[in-house]
Amino acid sequence: MTARAVPFHCPYCADEDLRPHGDAHGEWECRSCLRAFRLGFIGQLSPSNLTTHESPTAPSRKEDAS
């Protein structure tokens, strides 16, 4: 059995000074920006069940109608 992964960076400020927060698994606190957050695994995806949202950085695929 492998150990559970831990976050390496705060999702808010990207600092690395993270500590476990509280007694619940997956709760972390950032000592830099003083935020607490929770991480959790939702589940595995199947190729037929992927979201259809485009990446916000992806170029637009709309074609001009002119």
Image (cartoon, grey):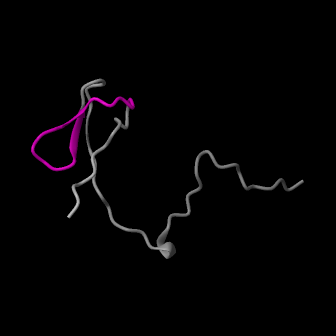
Residue 20 percent across, percent down from the top left = 18, 39
Residue 42 percent across, percent down from the top left = 32, 61
Residue extending farthest top: 32
In the rendered image, the quadrant that contains the N terminus is: bottom left
Near-viewer residue (44 or 17): 17
Residue 33 percent across, percent down from the top left = 30, 25
Query: What predominant SS class does the magenta segment belong to?
Result: loop
Residue, x 21% and y 55% (percent of image)? Answer: 3
* Picture quadrant of residue 13: top left
| Residue 28 drawn in magenta | yes
Residue 26 percent across, percent down from the top left = 21, 48
Above or below residue 60? Residue 11 is above
Residue, x 32% and y 31% (percent of image)? Answer: 16
| Residue 21 drawn in magenta | yes
Above or below residue 8? Residue 41 is below
Q: Which residues are magenta?
A: 13-29
Near-viewer residue (59 or 20): 20
Name the side, left or right, on which 48 lies relative to 37.
right
Above or below residue 34? Residue 50 is below
Residue, x 37% and y 68% (percent of image)? Answer: 44
